[in-house]
Every structure is written in C-alpha cells, then in structure tokens.
Image (tube, rainbow, N blue to C red):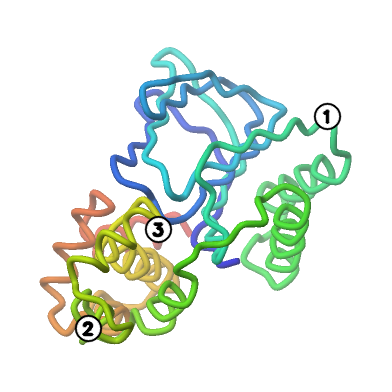
C-alpha cells in the first residue's frame, strides 16, 4: 500500500470529484455526516454516513455534493498495488467493530492530534493491512511486474511508454491496449498519476517547484507546472503557498 494523501474536513457546496478516466488509486472515505451522489457507468446511488467506502481504481466515476448541504469525512487516497479495485466497495461500520475502532482512532488523530507523525502512519498502515486482508479482492493485476517497474522508475525523466513497452518486449500499440484493458487507464496516464501525486507530497514537504519537478522526472520546470495545473487545477507554486499558509 502507498498512501498518497490524507485528511479530514467538511466539504462545502460545489465540492465534486470527476474521474473521466480511471484514477489508478482508490479513494477511501469514512463518511461521517451528509450525503453525496456517486455515479458510475450510467448508474448512481447516494452514499450515506456510517459506511466505509473504497472507490474503484480501474473504473471512471464521479461524486457530487447536494448543493444545499455539506458533508464531513475522513479521506485517504491509497494505492493498494498489486490489487486494483474495479468497483465501489461499501462496508457498514456497524457490522465490523474493528473498522469502527479505526474510524474513531483516525478521527481523533486528524481532529485532535498532529496527524503527520510516525504514530499516525502506523495506524494508517494497520488499517490498510486489515482492509486488504478482510475485504479487498484477492486477485491482483496481471501486469504486476510492469506496474512495479513504473512505480520504481517514474522519477526517471527518460521513462516513457515507448521505453516501457520495449523493456517488456511489446510494441507500443499492443502494450497500450493490454495495459488499458487490465487497469482501465493508459500507461501514460498511470505514469502521470504517479508523478503528480508524488509532486503533491513533495510540495507539501515544502520543496520548491524546481526541486519537485526534478524529483518526479521533469527536466523542464515549465512542462512540469503545466502538467500539474492540468491535473490538479492550480499551479504547483500556488498549491505550495496555499498549504504553507494553512500550516
């Protein structure tokens, strides 16, 4: 498991999530208050408090908030590689006292104590281990070796789809089809996701934009800034300043 982001808070009217292509990782929500609308492949359902939701990594979806309401949740962005969830997982907390205990403990960590501690990291890892063992599907991606290679080398500025496909003996066209069928996302999109979420983490650790660009595989900071803004909606410098001001 790789933890990409974490937090707790009240989301106000206008909040939404739109993943027109598969995210490549799973959002995990302990929904505490309010209701949100989940839509996937032409179907929709209301998500309600008291349930742990684990969102699919290989299926496009969207989440919207009722315009007249707010909702509060603990949220985690987690990559469960080599497991890749393909459908929404719903687990009632009432039926699992262990998950209920994790919900209370994580709430206390995020709301009362400092959550960027080794203790918090240990709790999140323990929660992830329990979730994977008890609830996540046992099947793993058939492209586990390839995905592992991307995860190990995404910081290399020379890594690209052509190079990855050649490394594993595929033509680029066949490789893209194979990867997309298995994970619901192209290899380029997966590589970009890895770089952009690592960039968020480094910016939150107060690295400069230039340092972050170099650390995630970009030899041109301007190209990195354009990719970051396209993915996250704000330039990396603004993202870094806004979180610094909140600290």
Mark in the foreground, 3 or 1:
1
> Considering depth in this image, is 78 or 232 the residue closer to the camera?
78
Q: Residue at x 49, y 62 (%)?
A: 4
Where the N terminus falls, by quadrant? bottom right
**Residue 121 location (% of width, % of height):** 68, 67
**Circle on res. 40:** none
Of the image marks 2 and 1, the number of the one nearer the N terminus? 1
Alpha-carbon neighbours of circle 1 within 10 Å: few (<14), some, or many (≥20)?
few
- 200 and 21: which one is in front? 21
Q: Is residue 114 rendered to the left or right of residue 243? A: right
Q: Residue at x 54, y 26 (%)?
A: 71
Q: Is residue 28 above or below residue 4?
A: above
Tell me where residue 149 sits by quadrant.
bottom left
- Spatial CA span between label 3 and label 1: 35 Å
Judging by the rendered image, the residue that carries numbered circle 2 is 163
Q: CA distance from mark 2 to mark 1?
A: 49 Å
Residue 229 sits above or below residue 192 on the image: above
Residue matched to label 3 = 243
Q: Position of residue 133 (x, y in %)?
A: 76, 57
Q: Which residue is mark 1?
A: 94
Task: Point out the frontmost of discs 3 and 2.
Answer: 2
């Amino acid at each position: 498991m790789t933890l990409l982001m974490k937090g707790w808070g009240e989301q106000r009217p206008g909040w939404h999530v739109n993943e027109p292509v598969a995210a490549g990782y799973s959002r995990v929500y302990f929904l505490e208050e309010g209701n949100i609308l989940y839509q996937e492949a032409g179907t929709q359902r209301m998500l309600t408090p008291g349930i742990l939701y684990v969102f699919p990594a290989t299926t496009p979806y969207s989440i919207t908030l009722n315009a007249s309401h707010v909702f509060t949740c603990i949220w985690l962005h987690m990559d469960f590689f080599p497991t890749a969830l393909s459908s929404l997982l719903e687990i009632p907390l009432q039926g699992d006292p262990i998950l209920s205990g994790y919900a209370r403990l994580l709430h206390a960590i995020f709301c009362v104590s400092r959550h960027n501690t080794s203790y918090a990291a240990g709790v999140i890892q323990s929660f992830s281990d329990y979730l994977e063992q008890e609830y996540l599907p046992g099947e793993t991606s058939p492209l586990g070796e390839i995905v592992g290679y991307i995860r190990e080398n995404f910081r290399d500025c020379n890594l690209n789809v052509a190079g990855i496909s050649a490394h594993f003996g595929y033509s680029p066209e066949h490789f893209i089809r194979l990867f997309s069928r298995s994970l619901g996302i192209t290899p380029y999109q997966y590589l970009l996701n890895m770089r952009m979420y690592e960039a968020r983490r480094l910016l939150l650790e107060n690295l400069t934009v230039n340092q972050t660009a170099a650390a995630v595989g970009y030899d041109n900071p301007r190209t990195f800034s354009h990719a970051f803004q396209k993915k996250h909606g704000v330039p990396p410098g603004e993202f870094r300043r806004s979180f610094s001001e909140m600290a």
